[in-house]
Amino acid sequence: MSPGHAEHLKTFDYVGRHRYFLTFCTFERRTLFVTDAAVTNVRTQFLRAADNERFAIIAYCFMPDHVHLLVEGQSHDSDACRFIARAKQLSAFHYEKAFGELLWQRYSYERVLRSEEATLSVARYILENPVRAGLVTRTADYAFLGSHTYSVDHILGGYR
């Protein structure tokens, strides 16, 4: 029987220098990420969690009702479960303090990238989400995406 939400892999410990494609959905899929203030508030807390848990944020894209992240552990003891919990907890607390409403659904989705999956290909896929969703015609026209590891131009490789 399915638990009604994504579960962590039982045979994987989520600790170490692994890469993860994460998706966090807003509470009741509300359209919350449409202003610089909201996105900056949450992105700041993601960076804080990444620093605390030793993760790099390779790519991020804030869609109106969810966010995609590509993160990578930077240490042998980087713990993705702790990063996810801390990122959601810090951002939810600061978002509610600033805007007076709940931020996240209880569960999130993660996919552990296989070693053969190219980091920049997955990052490009994340950054191109607004175009696929019809929000913009060019990736460069969307304000709420980026990377804290590479330039957007480097990730897109001329596909802007």
Image (cartoon, rainbow, N blue to C red):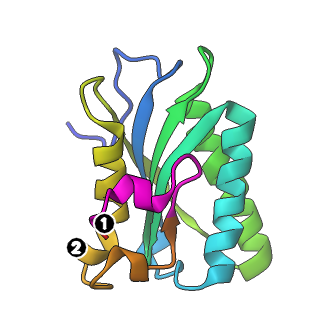
Q: Which residues are magenta?
A: 146-159
Q: Is residue 97 left or right of residue 6?
A: right
Counting other residues with Cα less than 10 Å from the Cα at mark 1, is it few (<14), some (14-19), or many (20 or more)?
many
Residue 24 magenta-highlighted:
no
Q: Position of residue 52 (x, y in %)?
A: 75, 36
User: Which residue position holds label 2?
Assistant: 132
Which quadrant of the figure contains the C terminus? bottom left
The label shown at residue 128 is: 1
Q: What amino acid type is highlighted by mark number 2? A: Arg
Residue ID at (27%, 76%): 131
Q: Residue at x 35, y 38 (%)?
A: 119
In the rendered structure, are the residues bearing label 1 and label 2 in contact, judged by CB atoms less than 8 Å apart? Answer: yes
Position of residue 156 relative to residue 115, above or below, is below
Distance in Å between CA atoms under marks 1 and 2: 7 Å
x, y percentage for residue 90?
A: 72, 53
Task: Decide if residue 129 is on the left or right side of residue 42.
Answer: left
Instruction: Look at 20% across and 36% down and name the residue there.
Output: 1
Tell me where residue 81 sits by quadrant: top right
